[in-house]
Image: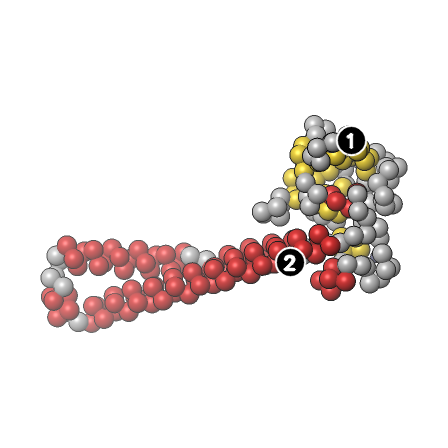
Amino acid sequence: MKKIILGTMGNQPFKISGGGVSGEHATVTIDDHGNWSIADMGSTNGTFLRDDATGELSPVGTTPIHIHPMTFIVLGSDDSMGCCFYARQVLKPGDFNDEHLYICDKHQQLNAQEQKSSSITKRIKQFTFIAMLGITILSFEPHVIEWLGGNSKMFNFYRIFSLASSGVGAFYDGKSLKDKVKRKRKLFNQCPNPQCSHHMSASEIEDKRCAKCGK
Ligand SMILES: [Zn+2]
């Protein structure tokens, strides 16, 4: 079993200086079966983990909770501006191979989500346009109304369908979906280097080293 104390006075393989991090801030434990867990040690500013799906940070208590090597840990701030790193850095400091793969994978997932949301938006726009076009034609052409059977079931169905689809068009917000993906992209694009606390750019992640300090 391995027990790593994270903090300004911790035994992690990189130096943590200040930034709201306590002397003994949190403990990462790796048991003999390779199970990872983390617990806060009653730190002043708290320990947070990033959700793999949403990117939201949630606090960790003093009860150990299960993590994995690619869990994103934030010490001392709930907005990822504290000391942050992927858990595996406590074993392999300065090795960013898995981070690189993880971030590439996230990008692919987000690209797929973005493509899907823009194709849904396009379809809803077309659908709404056709419905509105139909309503407009009908409003000008009493013969069409007559041909559809005046107030028959078919005509009522058509009216409900048109109303519903124009409603969807009015309330469906494609932009907010796009913004959501954008926000996620920003969140998951982060690869902090705990050795120098620099957030590495895409090209630095690809080079697997910090361009500023070479670590
Ligand atoms: Zn650096």
Q: State the mark number for residue 1.
A: 1
Q: Is mark 2 within 8 Å of ligand 1?
A: no
Cα–Cα gap, marks 2 and 1: 31 Å
Q: State the mark number for residue 104.
A: 2
What secondary structure is found at the residue carrying circle 2? helix
Sequence-wise, the earlier of marks 2 and 1 is 1
User: Type of residue at label 1?
Assistant: Met
Q: Position of residue 147 (x, y in %)?
A: 11, 67
Q: Position of residue 135 (x, y in %)?
A: 25, 66
Q: Position of residue 213 (x, y in %)?
A: 87, 59
Q: What's the residue at 12%, 70% (across, down)?
A: 143
38 relative to 203, above or below: above
Camera sees residue 22:
no
User: Type of residue at label 2?
Assistant: Cys
Q: Is residue 135 left or right of residue 195?
A: left
Q: Is residue 87 left or right of residue 165?
A: right
The N terminus is located in which quarter?
top right
Closest to the observer, 71 or 114? 71
Q: What's the residue at 28%, 69% (across, down)?
A: 133
Camera sees residue 134:
yes
Q: Is residue 140 left or right of residue 186?
A: left
Q: Position of residue 136 (x, y in %)?
A: 25, 69
Q: What's the residue at 64%, 58% (across, down)?
A: 104
What secondary structure is found at the residue carrying circle 1? loop
